[in-house]
Amino acid sequence: MWRPAGAGKTAVADLVQHSLPAATRPSSHAFKAAHPDYLTLLPEDPHEAGAAVRTGYRARQKTAEDHVRAQRGHKVCEAADAPGDYAHASRRTMRRATGWRW
């Protein structure tokens, strides 16, 4: 689901994930928090910490999403409007892998 902040994505994603057996929900929040530099940068500049580690955590998230696709598993994806073509690239990748159209 790609919708603006506050549109209810998390609530809907919770319901969808609950209804799918063994669904995976790769969240950028989890990957960001797991980045080795994020917790160090966060107290220094909370507004820029995420941007500083974005390339690293997105690469890890993409690896996890690719694994789910390769295993033909269920993936629940929720994302706010992303800068640039990141969200569009992710949708194109999912379309190629699954044939789904949004």
Image: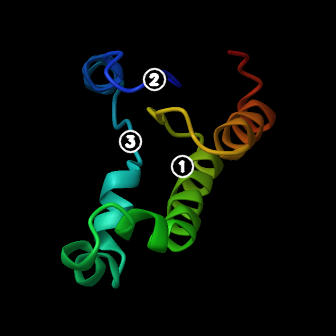
Splitting the image into 4 quarters, where does residue 12 fall?
A: top left
Q: Residues within 10 Å of mark 1 (few under 14, many from 20)?
A: some
- Which residue shows up at 38% across the image and 48% down it? 27
Q: What residue type is labelled 3?
A: Arg
Splitting the image into 4 quarters, where does residue 31 fall?
A: bottom left
- Which residue shows up at 28% across the image and 66% down it? 33
Q: How crowded is mark 2: few (under 14 residues within 10 Å), some or many (20 or more)?
A: few
State how far apart marks 1 and 2 are (Cα). 25 Å
* In this view, 15 is above or below 57: above
Per the image, label 1 sits on a secondary structure element best described as: helix
Q: Horizontal and vertical percent for residue 88?
A: 72, 36
Observer-side mark, 1 or 3, equals 3
The tag earlier along the polypeptide, 1 or 2, is 2
Q: Horizontal and vertical percent for residue 41?
A: 29, 80
In the picture of the structure, the residue carrying the numbered disc 2 is 4
In the picture of the structure, the residue carrying the numbered disc 3 is 25
Q: Horizontal and vertical percent for residue 22?
A: 34, 37
Q: What residue type is labelled 1?
A: Val
Q: Which of 42 and 45 is in front in this view?
A: 45
The tag earlier along the polypeptide, 1 or 3, is 3
Residue 68: image tag: 1
Q: Horizontal and vertical percent for residue 97?
A: 75, 38
Per the image, label 2 sits on a secondary structure element best described as: loop
Residue 5: image tag: none
Q: What residue type is labelled 2?
A: Pro
- Which residue shows up at 33% across the image and 84% down it? 36
The tag earlier along the polypeptide, 3 or 2, is 2
Q: In this view, does 28 lie to the left or right of 64?
A: left
State how far apart marks 1 and 3 are (Cα). 10 Å
Quadrant in which the C terminus appears: top right
